[in-house]
């Protein structure tokens, strides 16, 4: 794509993201259309939540809205642009109470990210690199910074703390989503009933004494291959304690 076209495309996406903050352009008066960009974005989110990001196409969203595919380009220029708008739209608008202890505020940062990803698993399939920042994501970043300002971290360290908490929450959410998907097909108990005896037959127990011992303990405790919720609670608390120790 030529540079001028890239600039025009980027400008269009930013204007769509910040559409509620920008003044109306000259010549836009007149009857309001029966559909808005917000409606298109909401339909895209509904489709992605239900069917996954792989099923998200301009045609599918148009069908969701009862429209022809070409008419949707009146509202969004491309599927990529629509995804950018969707990512911003689902950014949680949940305040972090200022009266919470700082440790709890930092845990809340990670918890909100994890919850958002579990509620919208398709976000895990969208590259986080060079994501265009829209109003909802910027407001969330502002709230996150406000939650940890004044604890003794430099500006750079505050940003890195948020990044580390986000990365941890994202990795754990990926495991939680995978666990939920697997359980929907076959329960952990049924999976282990089949695979447990087979593993006992093929794995030389003497070669893996620690793995065998620890695996037995955690398997009995979790009743599953892993415990995403418990791992999150333990991990985020340990991570926050480490971050605060450097403050």
Image: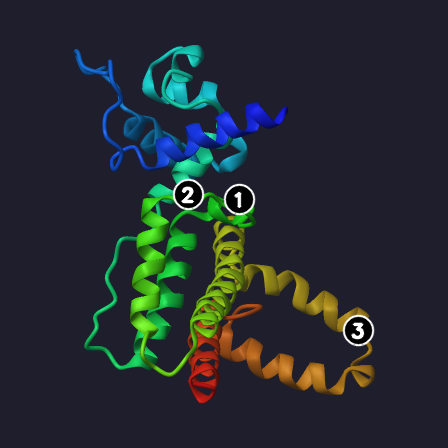
Q: Is residue 158 above or below residue 129?
A: below
Q: Which of 55 and 222 is in front in this view?
A: 55
Q: For the residue labelled by badge 1, is the local secondary structure a helix, a strand or a loop?
A: loop
Q: Residue at x 48, y 77 (%)?
A: 235
Q: Nearer the viewer, residue 10 or 39?
A: 10
Q: Quadrant of the C terminus?
A: bottom left
Q: Which residue is drawn at 45% across and 67% down?
A: 159
Q: Earlier in the sequence, mark 1 or mark 2?
A: 2
Q: Which of marks 2 and 3 is nearer the N terminus?
A: 2
Display colour scheme: rainbow
Circle 2 packing at 10 Å, graded few (<14), some (14-19), many (20+), is many
CA gap, disc 1 to disc 3? 38 Å
Q: Does any portion of residue 69 appear in the rendered image?
A: yes
Between label 2 and label 3, give the one nearer the viewer: 2
The number of numbered discs placed on residues in the rendered structure image is: 3
Q: Which of marks 1 and 3 is nearer the N terminus?
A: 1
Q: Is residue 60 above or below residue 140?
A: above
Between label 1 and label 3, give the one nearer the viewer: 1
Q: Which of 232 and 245 is in front in this view?
A: 245
140 vs 232, left or right, is left
Q: Is residue 210 above or below residue 175?
A: below
Q: Verify CB contact (< 8 Å) between mark 1 and mark 2.
A: yes
**Rendering coords of residue 208 (x, y %):** 77, 82
225 vs 62, left or right, is right
CA gap, disc 1 to disc 2? 8 Å
In the image, which disc is placed on residue 203?
3
Q: Can you identify the residue that label 2 sits on?
A: 87
Q: For the residue labelled by badge 2, is the local secondary structure a helix, a strand or a loop?
A: helix
Q: Can you identify the residue that label 1 sits on?
A: 126
Q: Quadrant of the N terminus?
A: top right
**Rendering coords of residue 22 (x, y %):** 27, 33
């Amino acid at each position: 794509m030529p540079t001028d076209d890239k600039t025009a495309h980027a400008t269009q996406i930013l204007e769509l993201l910040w559409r509620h903050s920008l003044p109306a352009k000259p010549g836009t008066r007149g009857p309001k259309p029966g559909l808005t960009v917000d409606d298109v974005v909401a339909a895209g989110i509904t489709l992605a939540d239900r069917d996954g990001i792989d099923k998200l196409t301009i045609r599918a969203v148009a069908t969701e809205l009862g429209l022809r595919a070409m008419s949707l380009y009146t509202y969004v220029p491309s599927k990529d642009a629509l995804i950018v708008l969707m990512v911003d739209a689902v950014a949680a608008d949940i305040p972090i109470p200022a009266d919470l202890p700082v440790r709890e505020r930092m845990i809340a940062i990670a918890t909100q990210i994890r919850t958002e990803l579990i509620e919208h698993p398709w976000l895990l399939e969208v590259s986080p690199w060079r994501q265009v920042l829209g109003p909802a994501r910027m407001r969330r970043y502002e709230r996150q910074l406000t939650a940890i300002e004044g604890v003794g971290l430099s500006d750079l360290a505050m940003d890195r703390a948020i990044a580390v908490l986000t990365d941890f929450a994202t990795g754990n959410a990926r495991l939680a989503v995978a666990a939920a998907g697997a359980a929907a097909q076959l329960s952990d108990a049924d999976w282990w009933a089949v695979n447990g005896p087979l593993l006992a037959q093929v794995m030389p127990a003497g070669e893996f004494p620690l793995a065998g011992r620890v695996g037995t303990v955690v398997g009995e405790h979790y009743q599953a291959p892993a415990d995403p919720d418990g791992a999150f609670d333990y991990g985020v608390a340990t991570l926050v304690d480490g971050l605060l120790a450097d403050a």
